[in-house]
């Protein structure tokens, strides 16, 4: 990977990690506000979507970090190295989607994607 692309991946990873932290703080505030309330299905779906956003930002930040690392001794910048970094993503289906798996079925609306 070129030095420019490495810097870009590191910057993207840091940016996504920062937004993940912001999203997690928002989750906490919303959780405090909703504590003790009986949520409607629509509200539950919205809270799950925010949680999913936080998780995806963390995972994408991790991917940028993995891809910005120099290859290990004897390793080259190959499709298999990149594929390996994508497969380390542990959210349901994220690695498959980014890896171009044509058989992947996305989570349905309101279904949380958990690791």
Image (spheres, helix red, strand yellow):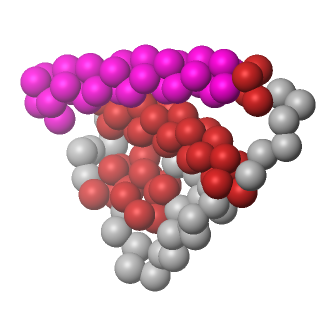
Which residue sits at x=46%, y=64%? 96
79 on left or right of 40: left
**Residue 94 location (% of width, % of height):** 48, 56
Residue range (magenta): 1-30
Q: Residue 54 versus residue 64: which sits nearer the camera?
A: 54
30 on left or right of 79: right
Which residue sits at x=73%, y=22%? 33
Outermost residue to the right = 36
Which residue sits at x=67%, y=47%? 43
The N terminus: image quadrant:
top left
45 on left or right of 63: right
**Residue 101 location (% of width, % of height):** 40, 73
Residue 30: image quadrant is top right
- What's the magenta bit mostly, secondary-structure-wise? helix
Residue 66 lies, with reference to residue 24, above or below; the image says: below
Q: Residue 87 versus residue 98: which sits nearer the camera?
A: 98
Residue 20 lies, with reference to residue 49, above or below; the image says: above
Q: Is residue 67 magenta?
A: no
1 on left or right of 62: left
The answer to whether residue 48 is seen in the rendering is: no
**Residue 66 location (% of width, % of height):** 40, 34
The answer to whether residue 14 is seen in the rendering is: yes
User: In this figure, what is the number of numbered marks?
Assistant: 0
Residue 82 lies, with reference to residue 108, above or below; the image says: above
Q: Is residue 15 magenta?
A: yes
Q: Residue 20 versus residue 60: which sits nearer the camera?
A: 20
């Amino acid at each position: 990977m070129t030095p420019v692309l490495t810097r870009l991946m590191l910057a993207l990873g840091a940016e996504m990690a920062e937004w993940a932290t912001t999203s997690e703080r928002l989750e906490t505030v919303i959780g405090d506000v909703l504590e003790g309330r009986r949520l409607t299905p629509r509200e539950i779906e919205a809270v799950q979507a925010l949680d999913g956003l936080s998780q995806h930002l963390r995972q994408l930040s991790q991917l940028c970090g993995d891809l910005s690392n120099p290859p290990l001794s004897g390793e080259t910048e190959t499709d298999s190295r990149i594929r390996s970094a994508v497969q380390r993503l542990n959210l349901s289906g994220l690695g498959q989607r980014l890896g171009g798996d044509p058989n992947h079925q996305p989570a349905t609306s309101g279904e949380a994607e958990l690791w």
